[in-house]
Image: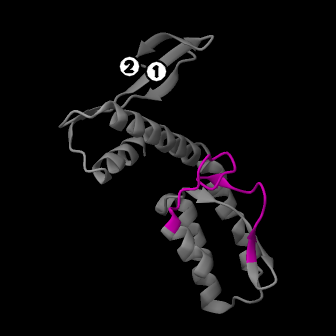
Amino acid sequence: FIVDSVTAYLVARGLHIDTIIHPLLYVSSSQGRITHVSKAAADKAQPTALVYIELARRLTRTQCAEIANDLRQIIEDVHLATSDWPHMKASVKNLLPSLAHAPSVKGEEKDELLAFIDYIHDDNFTLLGVCRYDVAGKSLKRAAKTGLGLLSDKRSAFFLNGEEKALLKHA
């Protein structure tokens, strides 16, 4: 996800990538300092993704600072989505019992819905974020502290731009 997310961002900015190298390294550290780097797994070494990119043109200091800031957010998003992945899958699977007993969905429609939830759970759909909404009259209200991945309360910025937020308000 890191390589795809970073390259998509750079391409969207109109930047041409000349070189990209993405090895997985194993890093050992002590007291916040790197003590050893290896290509092979070692005792207590953490797998660490390194992304090295060369662009086709030089950037100004201002552009570099802006891109570095954006890339930090992108990497944070990838971390949230991947670290919450098992919990998001479990939350999807946990829908099955309540949907199986939902009186408003019957017959083939229910079978299709349950099969679709299984399909999503079985890694046929990339879950980037999950949260629960409660029904409040004729509207939905996001339940506090239920977000995972990109919908996590830990996320520093909401990923929709102003235009997309406006579309959701009118949906």
Q: Amino acid at mark 1?
A: Tyr
Q: Amino acid at mark 2?
A: Lys
Residue 169 is one of the magenta-drawn residues = no
Q: Is residue 164 left or right of residue 144?
A: left
Contact, mark 2 vs mark 1 (Cβ under 8 Å): yes
Q: Is residue 125 above or below residue 51?
A: below
**Magenta segment: does it hold 145?**
yes
Percent of width and height locating residue 64: 35, 34
| Any part of residue 6 in sight | yes
* Residue depicted at x 58% and y 17%: 44
Tell me where residue 37 sits by quadrant: top left
Left or right for 37, reference 16: right
> Considering depth in this image, is 161 or 48 the residue closer to the camera?
161
User: Which residue is located at x 42 percent, y 42 percent?
Assistant: 2
Residues 14 and 18: in front is 14
Instruction: Point out residue 59 in the picture as x, y percentages from the top left corner.
Output: 26, 34
Q: Quadrant of the C terminus?
A: bottom right
